Amino acid sequence: MAAIAGRVEFIADGVRYQLGESVTIRPFQSSKEIINGVNGPIGHKVTGVAPSIEVEIGTTSDTLMKTLEALEDATVTAKCANGLQYVLKGAIVEGEPDVNPVDGKVTITFRGTIMDEV
């Protein structure tokens, strides 16, 4: 029986990171929304959105936040147990991650310009 979930390998600009307990991949590059009129739905609109990968990584003495902060136009890859790979291009670290030194983890959102599903 083939694996459909479980292990994920995470690489940002060639650096492999140890993952914590969560990975969220948002591959869509558009968002659709129903437009309602007075008599009900009349159609929909499509808005472009930036795809993203949010990961919880384990911090070590090699995990430097300044390195992550400096990432621009990065390539971020999540390789999933089911064989799918998601490659986010033109990525930056969005927002200001909070490092939790008690459990040694930090949650980081990478948002980019395009995501390929391989």
Image (tube, helix red, strand yellow):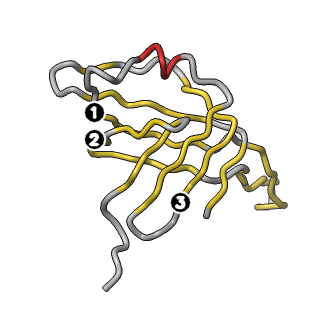
- Where does label 2 land, which residue? 20
Label 2 residue SS? strand
Closer to the chain start, of discs 2 and 1, is 2
Is 38 on the left or on the right of 11, as rendered?
Answer: right
**Location of mark 3 (residue):** 85
Q: Earlier in the sequence, mark 1 or mark 3?
A: 1
Q: CA distance from mark 1 to mark 3?
A: 21 Å
| Mark identifier at residue 58 | 1
Q: Secondary structure at mark 1?
A: strand
Label 3–label 2 contact, CB within 8 A? no
How far across and down, in percent of the image, does residue 30 sit? 73, 50
- Closer to the chain start, of discs 3 and 2, is 2
Question: Are dots 2 and 1 in contact, CB under 8 Å?
Answer: yes
Residue 13 percent location from the top left of the image: 55, 35
Q: Is residue 55 left or right of residue 44?
A: left
Three-letter residue code for mark 2: Gly
Residue 3 placement: quadrant: bottom left
**Quarter of the image where one finds residue 65:** top left
